Amino acid sequence: MATDKNEHEKSHLIGYGTYVLSWLALLSLAILTVAVAGLDLGNFTLFTALLIAAIKSALVIMIFMHIKYDEPIFKVFLAIALLVLVIVFVLMGFDVFYR
Amino acid sequence: MSTASELQNTEHLTGGHAHIHRDDVGAKLGMWLFLFTEVLLFGGMFLLYMAYRLEYTFEFQISAKELDMALGTVNTLILLTSSLTMALSIAAIQRNKKTLSLIFIIATISLALAFLVNKYFEWSAKFHHGIYPGATELAEKSNGEIIFFGLYYAMTGLHGLHVLIGIVVLLFMLVFVARNKITADNYMKLENSGLYWHLVDLIWIFLFPLFYLLH
Protein backbone atom coordinates (compact mmCIF):
# COMPACT_ATOMS: atom_id res chain seq x y z
CA MET A 1 0.00 0.00 0.00
CA ALA A 2 2.73 2.42 1.01
CA THR A 3 4.81 1.59 -2.04
CA ASP A 4 1.73 1.89 -4.24
CA LYS A 5 1.19 5.37 -2.96
CA ASN A 6 4.80 6.38 -3.50
CA GLU A 7 4.64 5.12 -7.08
CA HIS A 8 1.46 7.08 -7.47
CA GLU A 9 3.05 10.27 -6.14
CA LYS A 10 6.18 9.90 -8.19
CA SER A 11 4.10 9.71 -11.33
CA HIS A 12 3.18 13.36 -11.02
CA LEU A 13 6.10 15.07 -9.35
CA ILE A 14 5.96 18.80 -9.78
CA GLY A 15 8.94 20.10 -11.73
CA TYR A 16 11.37 22.77 -10.52
CA GLY A 17 10.36 24.83 -13.56
CA THR A 18 6.71 25.00 -12.47
CA TYR A 19 7.78 26.46 -9.12
CA VAL A 20 10.18 28.96 -10.69
CA LEU A 21 7.49 30.13 -13.15
CA SER A 22 4.98 30.57 -10.30
CA TRP A 23 7.58 32.52 -8.36
CA LEU A 24 8.21 34.81 -11.35
CA ALA A 25 4.47 35.38 -11.70
CA LEU A 26 4.24 36.17 -7.96
CA LEU A 27 7.11 38.67 -8.18
CA SER A 28 5.49 40.36 -11.20
CA LEU A 29 2.17 40.62 -9.36
CA ALA A 30 3.90 42.05 -6.28
CA ILE A 31 5.55 44.73 -8.40
CA LEU A 32 2.26 45.36 -10.21
CA THR A 33 0.39 45.91 -6.95
CA VAL A 34 3.02 48.44 -5.82
CA ALA A 35 2.87 50.24 -9.21
CA VAL A 36 -0.93 50.34 -9.15
CA ALA A 37 -0.92 51.72 -5.59
CA GLY A 38 0.79 54.85 -6.97
CA LEU A 39 -2.17 55.53 -9.26
CA ASP A 40 -5.33 57.18 -8.04
CA LEU A 41 -8.10 54.73 -8.83
CA GLY A 42 -10.53 56.14 -6.29
CA ASN A 43 -12.86 53.48 -4.96
CA PHE A 44 -11.17 50.82 -7.04
CA THR A 45 -7.84 51.10 -5.20
CA LEU A 46 -8.81 48.65 -2.47
CA PHE A 47 -10.61 46.39 -4.95
CA THR A 48 -7.55 46.22 -7.25
CA ALA A 49 -5.17 45.54 -4.35
CA LEU A 50 -7.40 42.74 -3.03
CA LEU A 51 -7.89 41.27 -6.50
CA ILE A 52 -4.12 41.05 -7.04
CA ALA A 53 -3.68 39.59 -3.52
CA ALA A 54 -6.35 36.99 -4.32
CA ILE A 55 -4.59 35.98 -7.56
CA LYS A 56 -1.27 35.69 -5.69
CA SER A 57 -2.94 33.57 -2.99
CA ALA A 58 -4.47 31.27 -5.60
CA LEU A 59 -1.01 30.73 -7.11
CA VAL A 60 0.55 29.96 -3.72
CA ILE A 61 -2.29 27.61 -2.68
CA MET A 62 -2.56 25.78 -6.01
CA ILE A 63 1.13 25.33 -6.84
CA PHE A 64 3.27 25.83 -3.72
CA MET A 65 0.75 24.17 -1.37
CA HIS A 66 0.00 21.48 -3.99
CA ILE A 67 -3.79 21.77 -3.73
CA LYS A 68 -4.04 21.46 -7.52
CA TYR A 69 -2.36 18.03 -7.31
CA ASP A 70 -3.95 16.82 -4.05
CA GLU A 71 -6.86 14.44 -3.51
CA PRO A 72 -10.36 16.02 -3.88
CA ILE A 73 -10.94 15.92 -0.09
CA PHE A 74 -8.35 18.70 0.35
CA LYS A 75 -10.18 20.90 -2.16
CA VAL A 76 -13.47 20.27 -0.33
CA PHE A 77 -11.90 21.21 3.03
CA LEU A 78 -10.37 24.36 1.60
CA ALA A 79 -13.61 25.37 -0.13
CA ILE A 80 -15.59 25.01 3.12
CA ALA A 81 -13.00 27.01 5.08
CA LEU A 82 -12.95 29.81 2.50
CA LEU A 83 -16.76 29.83 2.33
CA VAL A 84 -16.96 30.28 6.12
CA LEU A 85 -14.48 33.14 5.88
CA VAL A 86 -16.46 34.84 3.09
CA ILE A 87 -19.76 34.45 5.01
CA VAL A 88 -18.23 35.99 8.13
CA PHE A 89 -16.82 38.92 6.15
CA VAL A 90 -20.03 39.56 4.21
CA LEU A 91 -22.19 39.46 7.37
CA MET A 92 -19.78 41.77 9.18
CA GLY A 93 -19.77 44.08 6.13
CA PHE A 94 -23.57 44.34 6.20
CA ASP A 95 -23.50 45.04 9.92
CA VAL A 96 -20.96 47.82 9.58
CA PHE A 97 -22.60 49.37 6.48
CA TYR A 98 -26.21 49.43 7.71
CA ARG A 99 -25.58 50.32 11.32
CA MET B 1 -14.05 -6.54 15.64
CA SER B 2 -11.01 -5.11 17.32
CA THR B 3 -9.47 -8.48 18.08
CA ALA B 4 -9.86 -9.48 14.46
CA SER B 5 -8.09 -6.37 13.22
CA GLU B 6 -5.42 -6.71 15.90
CA LEU B 7 -4.84 -10.24 14.75
CA GLN B 8 -4.53 -8.99 11.20
CA ASN B 9 -2.05 -6.35 12.29
CA THR B 10 0.08 -8.89 14.13
CA GLU B 11 -0.02 -11.17 11.16
CA HIS B 12 1.02 -8.31 8.98
CA LEU B 13 3.88 -7.32 11.30
CA THR B 14 5.22 -10.82 11.68
CA GLY B 15 4.48 -11.69 8.10
CA GLY B 16 7.26 -9.87 6.30
CA HIS B 17 9.58 -6.92 6.64
CA ALA B 18 9.09 -4.49 9.51
CA HIS B 19 6.24 -2.23 8.46
CA ILE B 20 5.49 0.94 10.37
CA HIS B 21 2.02 2.25 9.75
CA ARG B 22 1.97 5.72 8.31
CA ASP B 23 -0.93 7.82 7.11
CA ASP B 24 0.44 10.59 4.91
CA VAL B 25 -2.92 11.88 3.72
CA GLY B 26 -4.19 11.95 7.32
CA ALA B 27 -1.10 13.84 8.46
CA LYS B 28 -1.55 16.42 5.73
CA LEU B 29 -5.27 16.75 6.43
CA GLY B 30 -4.44 17.40 10.08
CA MET B 31 -2.00 20.09 9.05
CA TRP B 32 -4.61 21.77 6.86
CA LEU B 33 -7.11 21.72 9.75
CA PHE B 34 -4.50 23.45 11.90
CA LEU B 35 -3.91 26.01 9.13
CA PHE B 36 -7.67 26.75 9.06
CA THR B 37 -7.53 27.64 12.76
CA GLU B 38 -4.66 29.99 11.89
CA VAL B 39 -6.79 31.52 9.14
CA LEU B 40 -9.55 32.10 11.70
CA LEU B 41 -7.06 33.70 14.09
CA PHE B 42 -5.83 36.15 11.48
CA GLY B 43 -9.30 36.38 9.91
CA GLY B 44 -10.63 37.90 13.12
CA MET B 45 -7.97 40.58 12.96
CA PHE B 46 -8.69 41.27 9.29
CA LEU B 47 -12.37 41.65 10.27
CA LEU B 48 -11.42 44.28 12.84
CA TYR B 49 -9.28 45.97 10.22
CA MET B 50 -12.22 46.07 7.78
CA ALA B 51 -14.65 47.46 10.31
CA TYR B 52 -12.28 50.18 11.50
CA ARG B 53 -11.11 51.04 8.01
CA LEU B 54 -14.73 51.71 7.00
CA GLU B 55 -15.15 53.88 10.07
CA TYR B 56 -11.82 55.76 9.88
CA THR B 57 -11.04 55.73 6.14
CA PHE B 58 -9.26 59.09 6.17
CA GLU B 59 -7.20 58.46 9.33
CA PHE B 60 -6.11 55.08 7.99
CA GLN B 61 -4.85 56.75 4.81
CA ILE B 62 -2.74 59.36 6.63
CA SER B 63 -1.30 56.78 9.03
CA ALA B 64 -0.39 54.37 6.23
CA LYS B 65 1.74 57.07 4.59
CA GLU B 66 4.07 56.87 7.60
CA LEU B 67 4.86 53.21 6.88
CA ASP B 68 7.98 52.39 4.87
CA MET B 69 6.61 51.21 1.51
CA ALA B 70 10.06 50.36 0.11
CA LEU B 71 10.93 48.15 3.10
CA GLY B 72 7.51 46.53 2.90
CA THR B 73 8.05 45.77 -0.80
CA VAL B 74 11.49 44.29 -0.16
CA ASN B 75 10.02 42.08 2.56
CA THR B 76 7.28 40.96 0.18
CA LEU B 77 9.87 39.89 -2.40
CA ILE B 78 11.89 38.14 0.33
CA LEU B 79 8.91 36.13 1.58
CA LEU B 80 7.79 35.16 -1.94
CA THR B 81 11.31 33.95 -2.71
CA SER B 82 11.43 32.01 0.57
CA SER B 83 8.22 30.26 -0.47
CA LEU B 84 9.95 29.24 -3.70
CA THR B 85 13.02 27.83 -1.91
CA MET B 86 10.69 26.00 0.51
CA ALA B 87 8.81 24.35 -2.36
CA LEU B 88 12.10 23.53 -4.10
CA SER B 89 13.49 21.84 -0.97
CA ILE B 90 10.51 19.44 -1.05
CA ALA B 91 10.93 18.89 -4.80
CA ALA B 92 14.60 18.09 -4.19
CA ILE B 93 13.99 15.55 -1.40
CA GLN B 94 11.30 13.87 -3.53
CA ARG B 95 14.03 13.32 -6.13
CA ASN B 96 16.37 11.96 -3.44
CA LYS B 97 18.71 14.98 -3.67
CA LYS B 98 19.54 15.42 0.01
CA THR B 99 22.25 18.08 -0.32
CA LEU B 100 20.14 20.21 -2.65
CA SER B 101 17.21 19.94 -0.26
CA LEU B 102 19.44 21.03 2.66
CA ILE B 103 20.69 24.01 0.65
CA PHE B 104 17.11 25.10 -0.11
CA ILE B 105 16.06 24.75 3.55
CA ILE B 106 19.05 26.86 4.61
CA ALA B 107 18.11 29.44 1.94
CA THR B 108 14.54 29.54 3.30
CA ILE B 109 15.76 30.07 6.87
CA SER B 110 18.18 32.80 5.71
CA LEU B 111 15.42 34.64 3.86
CA ALA B 112 13.16 34.36 6.91
CA LEU B 113 15.93 35.87 9.05
CA ALA B 114 16.39 38.68 6.50
CA PHE B 115 12.65 39.38 6.75
CA LEU B 116 12.89 39.70 10.54
CA VAL B 117 16.01 41.91 10.33
CA ASN B 118 14.08 44.28 8.03
CA LYS B 119 11.16 44.18 10.45
CA TYR B 120 13.55 45.13 13.27
CA PHE B 121 14.79 48.18 11.37
CA GLU B 122 11.26 49.13 10.38
CA TRP B 123 9.94 48.94 13.94
CA SER B 124 13.02 50.68 15.36
CA ALA B 125 12.38 53.64 13.04
CA LYS B 126 8.74 53.74 14.17
CA PHE B 127 9.76 53.59 17.85
CA HIS B 128 12.22 56.39 17.20
CA HIS B 129 9.38 58.57 15.90
CA GLY B 130 7.35 57.82 19.01
CA ILE B 131 4.91 55.49 17.26
CA TYR B 132 4.48 52.43 19.43
CA PRO B 133 1.67 51.14 21.66
CA GLY B 134 1.48 53.24 24.80
CA ALA B 135 3.66 56.08 23.48
CA THR B 136 2.60 59.57 24.59
CA GLU B 137 3.16 60.94 21.07
CA LEU B 138 0.85 58.32 19.62
CA ALA B 139 -1.76 58.91 22.32
CA GLU B 140 -2.05 62.55 21.16
CA LYS B 141 -3.09 61.47 17.68
CA SER B 142 -6.69 60.90 16.62
CA ASN B 143 -8.62 57.74 17.48
CA GLY B 144 -8.41 56.35 13.94
CA GLU B 145 -4.63 56.74 13.82
CA ILE B 146 -4.18 55.05 17.21
CA ILE B 147 -6.36 52.14 16.03
CA PHE B 148 -4.42 51.89 12.73
CA PHE B 149 -1.08 51.58 14.50
CA GLY B 150 -2.58 49.25 17.10
CA LEU B 151 -3.73 46.93 14.32
CA TYR B 152 -0.41 47.39 12.51
CA TYR B 153 1.60 46.24 15.53
CA ALA B 154 -0.80 43.44 16.48
CA MET B 155 -1.09 41.99 12.97
CA THR B 156 2.48 42.38 11.71
CA GLY B 157 3.67 41.40 15.20
CA LEU B 158 1.67 38.17 15.21
CA HIS B 159 2.82 37.53 11.66
CA GLY B 160 6.44 38.13 12.70
CA LEU B 161 5.98 35.64 15.54
CA HIS B 162 4.81 33.10 12.95
CA VAL B 163 7.94 33.77 10.88
CA LEU B 164 10.03 33.15 14.01
CA ILE B 165 8.18 29.88 14.72
CA GLY B 166 8.68 28.94 11.06
CA ILE B 167 12.44 29.40 11.46
CA VAL B 168 12.47 27.08 14.49
CA VAL B 169 10.39 24.45 12.65
CA LEU B 170 12.68 24.63 9.61
CA LEU B 171 15.77 24.25 11.82
CA PHE B 172 14.28 20.96 13.04
CA MET B 173 13.60 19.92 9.44
CA LEU B 174 17.19 20.74 8.56
CA VAL B 175 18.39 18.30 11.25
CA PHE B 176 15.82 15.66 10.18
CA VAL B 177 16.95 15.80 6.55
CA ALA B 178 20.62 15.76 7.56
CA ARG B 179 20.03 12.65 9.74
CA ASN B 180 17.95 10.89 7.06
CA LYS B 181 14.77 11.08 9.15
CA ILE B 182 13.20 12.82 6.17
CA THR B 183 13.80 10.93 2.92
CA ALA B 184 12.38 10.61 -0.59
CA ASP B 185 9.92 7.99 0.74
CA ASN B 186 9.04 9.80 3.94
CA TYR B 187 8.95 13.56 3.61
CA MET B 188 5.56 14.43 5.13
CA LYS B 189 7.21 16.42 7.96
CA LEU B 190 8.90 18.64 5.41
CA GLU B 191 5.72 18.87 3.33
CA ASN B 192 3.68 19.99 6.36
CA SER B 193 6.36 22.49 7.42
CA GLY B 194 6.16 23.81 3.86
CA LEU B 195 2.39 24.22 4.15
CA TYR B 196 2.89 26.22 7.35
CA TRP B 197 5.53 28.37 5.70
CA HIS B 198 3.33 29.09 2.68
CA LEU B 199 0.49 30.12 5.00
CA VAL B 200 2.81 32.67 6.61
CA ASP B 201 3.52 33.94 3.10
CA LEU B 202 -0.21 34.03 2.28
CA ILE B 203 -0.99 36.18 5.31
CA TRP B 204 1.72 38.63 4.32
CA ILE B 205 0.28 38.80 0.78
CA PHE B 206 -2.80 40.43 2.37
CA LEU B 207 -1.06 42.40 5.13
CA PHE B 208 1.24 44.15 2.65
CA PRO B 209 -1.34 45.94 0.44
CA LEU B 210 -3.70 46.62 3.35
CA PHE B 211 -1.09 48.39 5.47
CA TYR B 212 1.74 49.57 3.25
CA LEU B 213 -0.01 50.41 -0.01
CA LEU B 214 -2.85 52.52 1.38
CA HIS B 215 -2.72 55.95 -0.21
Image: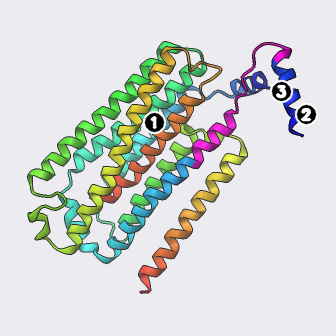
What is the C-alpha distance between the residues marked 2 and 1?
51 Å
What is the C-alpha distance between the residues marked 3 and 1?
45 Å
Q: Nearer the viewer, mark 2 or mark 1?
A: 2
Q: Nearer the viewer, mark 3 or mark 1?
A: 3
User: Looking at the picture, do discs 3 and 1 lie on one chain?
Assistant: no
Q: Nearer the viewer, residue B110 or B11?
A: B11
Q: Are marks 3 and 1 in contact (CB under 8 Å)?
A: no
Query: Which residue, given by chain and number where applicable, does mark 3 sit on?
Result: B9
Q: Hey, which quadrant is residue A96 in on the image?
A: bottom left
User: In the picture provided, is B137 more to the left or to the right than A76?
Assistant: left
Q: Amino acid at mark 2?
A: Ala
SS for dot 1: helix
Query: Which residue, given by chain and number where applicable, does mark 2 sit on?
Result: B4
Q: Amino acid at mark 1?
A: Trp
Query: Which residue, given by chain and number where applicable, does mark 1 sit on?
Result: A23
Q: Earlier in the sequence, mark 3 or mark 2?
A: 2
Q: Amino acid at mark 3?
A: Asn
Estimate the x, y position of residue B51 in percent, counting from the top left: 38, 73
Magenta extent: B14-33
Q: Nearer the viewer, residue B37 or B18?
A: B18
Determine the chain carrying the residue at label 1.
Answer: A
Mark 1 neighbour density, 10 Å: few (under 14) some (14–19) many (20 or more): many
* As drawn, A7 above or below B202: above
Estimate the x, y position of residue B187 in percent, counting from the top left: 59, 25
User: Looking at the picture, do discs 3 and 2 lie on one chain?
Assistant: yes
Mark 3 neighbour density, 10 Å: few (under 14) some (14–19) many (20 or more): few
* As drawn, B56 above or below B5: below
User: In the picture provided, is B170 more to the left or to the right than A67?
Assistant: left
